[in-house]
Image: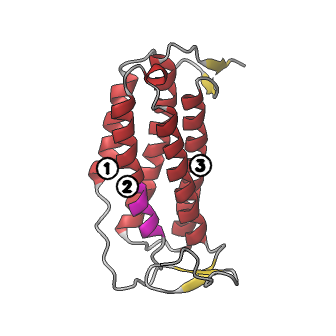
Amino acid sequence: MKIYTKTGDKGTTSLVGGKRVFKNDPRVEAYGDADELIAYLGLIVAESENPANTAGMATKIRKDILRIQQTLMCVSAFLAMPEEGTGKQLKPMEESETEFLEKGIDEMTGQMPPQKAFVIPGRPRQAALCHVARTVCRRVERRCVNIHSTDPNLEENLVKCKTYINRLSDYLFTLARFFCAITSTAEEFWLP
């Protein structure tokens, strides 16, 4: 199978089910941003491979991020489904995935000092990558809100995706702080 199809050469692409839309369609923008987020999470994993960078936490971090990437692939699939449906059935978005993020946030928070001011992203590199991923995650969330604002009767899966994405940005913020804690890197704070 060839990687190129030439079907998008005129600026359109297919949603799940075959409906053709322009590549700047809100759904395409949303799942494109989710794809970017998945790629940044891969960078975090790659940067975490060195045990010196993660205080021996690389295996857990890699496993957790892989789970998040897989869930984001499901989010992308929900985003790629047109409002009128396609007859295709996707596995429902599980609330347990949001609970997984919350548990991770609580576990990491319990292993670091409390936050007392706004964090300025910086060292170590893994923390900076987490902050970049967090900002992309917020963009995905805004794209989901945009889709929801044009169709307030969206199916429950897409509404659950918005909740998951919101929690994921909190998780990524916490993971950035956690990288600072486990590498004994002092955080930079904004102190107006």
For disc 2, the marked residue is: 71
Magenta region: which residues?
70-79
Residue matched to label 3: 136
How crowded pointer 2 is (Cα within 10 Å; few <14, some 14-19, many 20+) is rated as: some
Q: Which circle, 1 or 2, is nearer the viewer?
A: 2
Q: Is residue 145 left or right of residue 163?
A: right
In the image, farthest residue toward the right:
192
First reached walking from the N terminus: tag 3 or tag 2: 2
Front position in the image: 90 or 36: 36
Which kind of residue does numbered mark 2 sit on? Thr
Amino acid at circle 3: Val
Q: Quadrant of the C terminus?
A: top right
Point 51% across, 67% down: residue:
148
Disc 1 crowd, CA 10 A, few/some/many (<14, 14-19, 20+): some
Horizontal side, residue 174 vs residue 89: left or right: right
Residue at 59% from the left image edge and 20% from the top image edge: 117
Label 2 element class: helix
- Amino acid marked by disc 1: Glu
Q: Nearer the viewer, residue 66 or 142?
A: 66
Q: Is residue 117 above or below residue 152?
A: above
Count of marks placed on residues: 3
Give the labeled residue for mark 1. 97
The x, y position of residue 62, in whole percent, is 38, 38
Quarter occupied by residue 188: top right
In percent of the image, x 63 and y 83: which residue is there? 6
Label 1 close to label 2 by CB (< 8 Å): yes
Q: Is residue 25 in sight in this rendering?
A: yes
Which residue occupies the foreground of this view, 182 or 1? 1
